[in-house]
């Protein structure tokens, strides 16, 4: 497939962009990456591609835009059926469970990490941390059930839930260093601790999840930019 | 033990979405009504993460979250398609179903039950969101084309629940002049015999909504 047919509007620092890049890698799809500065003025090309949400990532395939990272990943899985193995499981029940955990991660768990970054009060922070750990506990149970003793949520191979959760590992490390503790530690969440190490060195994820120090630099820069314009 | 069980609540649009999906595919199921103020231990066991309805249990295995359940129903049983076959159209259907859940329903519901500035803000947010849906339906009979599909099922709140609530609270949000396409869709949707059979009675819902107003204005 010619590279020009597939474009990805995204940002290197965005985990939502990263997970789409991982999906494209899993399917060995050639694509043109178009870096978008999403935290300041929205570019015209982004507004045209995603007029409803005005967010990245946006996948453009044969000039047709697809928005929302989870929807994009499922599209990639369904549009390229002959490239490598499926991203989602093949059994309908396993697919429903994978979709359930992806929704939980995006709608309930990751927002807690973002909230932690914004809060300053010790008591509020402690309350949010408790919820984050509770969530990690649920994800540990999910990992044990889904992996069935194998290396990844999807079993022997990296799949949907692996990339949906794995894309956050850079920001998770940032949170860990700022909060001074481990979210996926060997005692409380041994399954996830092992999974996280295996995931970041997997071909699909390697070179995509940004180094924590780069994310911290980026975060500081965005905060400074906001302070100067606010 | 019935092969297919469904835990729901008669007044919940999310619950009714799942019933529509099951009936569309002609699946026989056992329905279990949940008292949302006193949830059964069975429900809490089947959905420990969110503790909500609807939950579908197929051969003892539970699935939660209405849109996820609908996709499961589409994949597990033969029958009319809930999602289209084409990958791009499927992505589109998922996009608008999610949009309805995240951007339309919350401000629409909030606009009904808030007052003053809060109501004005929610109303504006809902108006903007509905404009996108108005453009999307664009004179088609249903979001799914000639037959109802995932987005139509997801929009049940907009087509039915909201219209009843809007009238009772005197909101005037989804008006004919501002949203002619959506209003026409809502009419067709509720007339559709398949949908009509799967909606809660209007008077019972109206009583619930009137009850909310009374509770809000009661001295504290």
Image (spheres, coloured by chain):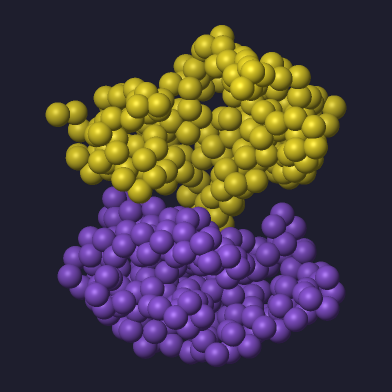
Whether residue B169 is situated above or below residue B65 in the rendered picture: above
Colour assigned to chain B in the rendering is: yellow
Q: Residue at x 83, y 31 (%)?
A: B178
Where is residue A130? Give x, y as percent.
41, 61
Whether residue A216 is situated above or below residue B69 in the rendered picture: below
Relative to residue A180, is residue B182 drawn left or right? right
Where is residue B146? Give x, y as percent.
59, 33
Where is residue A60? Give x, y as percent.
64, 69
Q: Quadrant of residue B139?
A: top right
In the orientation shown, which residue stands out farthest toward the top?
Answer: B203
Whether residue B191 is situated above or below residue A60 in the rendered picture: above
Where is residue B9? Give x, y as percent.
41, 25
Q: Quadrant of residue A189?
A: bottom left
- Say which quadrant the C terminus of chain B sits in: top right
Q: Residue at x 62, y 38 (%)?
A: B105
Whether residue B21 is situated above or below residue B205 in the rendered picture: below
- Say which quadrant the N terminus of chain B sits in: top left
Q: Quadrant of residue A14?
A: bottom right
Is residue B192 visible to the viewer in this orientation of the structure? yes
Marker count (numbered)? 0
Q: Nearer the viewer, residue B111 or A121?
A: A121
Q: Residue at x 29, y 65 (%)?
A: A140
Q: Nearer the viewer, residue B216 or A99?
A: B216
Colour assigned to chain A in the rendering is: purple
In the orientation shown, which residue stands out farthest toward the left?
Answer: B1
Relative to residue B146, is residue B74 drawn left or right? left
Q: Nearer the viewer, residue B48 or A33?
A: B48
Is residue B26 visible to the viewer in this orientation of the structure? no
């Amino acid at each position: 497939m010619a590279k020009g047919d597939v474009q990805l509007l995204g940002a290197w620092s965005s985990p939502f962009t990263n997970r789409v890049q991982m999906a494209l890698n899993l399917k060995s799809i050639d694509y043109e990456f178009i870096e978008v500065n999403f935290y300041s003025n929205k570019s015209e090309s982004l507004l045209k591609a995603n007029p409803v949400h005005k967010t990245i990532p946006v996948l453009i395939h044969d000039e047709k835009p697809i928005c929302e990272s989870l929807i994009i990943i499922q599209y990639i899985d369904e549009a390229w059926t002959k490239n490598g193995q499926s991203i989602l499981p093949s059994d309908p029940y396993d697919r429903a469970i994978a979709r359930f955990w992806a929704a939980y991660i995006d709608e309930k768990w990751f927002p807690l990490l973002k909230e932690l970054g914004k809060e300053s009060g010790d008591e509020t922070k402690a309350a949010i941390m408790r919820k984050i750990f509770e969530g990690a506990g649920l994800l540990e149970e999910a990992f044990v059930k889904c992996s069935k003793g194998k290396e990844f949520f999807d079993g022997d191979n990296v799949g949907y839930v692996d990339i949906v959760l794995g894309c956050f590992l850079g920001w998770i490390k940032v949170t860990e260093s700022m909060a001074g503790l481990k979210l996926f530690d060997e005692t409380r969440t041994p399954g996830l601790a092992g999974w996280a190490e295996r995931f970041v060195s997997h071909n699909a994820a390697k070179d995509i999840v940004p180094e924590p120090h780069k994310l911290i630099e980026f975060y500081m820069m965005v905060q400074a930019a906001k302070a100067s314009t606010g | 033990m019935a092969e297919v069980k469904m835990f729901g609540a008669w007044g919940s649009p999310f619950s009714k979405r799942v019933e529509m999906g099951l009936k569309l595919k002609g699946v026989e199921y056992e329905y279990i009504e949940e008292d949302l103020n006193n949830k059964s231990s069975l429900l809490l066991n089947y959905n420990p993460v969110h503790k909500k309805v609807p939950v579908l249990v197929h051969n003892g295995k539970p699935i939660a979250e209405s849109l996820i359940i609908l996709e499961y129903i589409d994949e597990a049983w033969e029958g009319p398609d809930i999602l289209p076959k084409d990958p791009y159209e499927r992505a589109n259907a998922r996009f608008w179903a999610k949009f309805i859940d995240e951007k339309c329903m919350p401000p629409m519901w909030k606009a009904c039950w808030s007052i003053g500035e809060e109501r004005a803000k929610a109303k504006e947010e809902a108006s903007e969101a509905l404009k996108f849906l108005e453009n999307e339906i664009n004179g088609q009979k249903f979001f799914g084309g000639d037959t109802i599909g995932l987005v139509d099922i997801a929009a049940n709140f907009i087509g039915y629940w909201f219209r009843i609530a809007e009238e009772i609270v005197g909101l005037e949000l989804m008006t004919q002049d501002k949203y002619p396409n959506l209003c026409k869709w809502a009419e067709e949707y509720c007339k559709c015999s398949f949908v009509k059979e799967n909606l809660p009675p209007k008077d019972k819902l109206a009583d619930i909504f009137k009850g909310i107003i009374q509770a809000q204005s009661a001295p504290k």
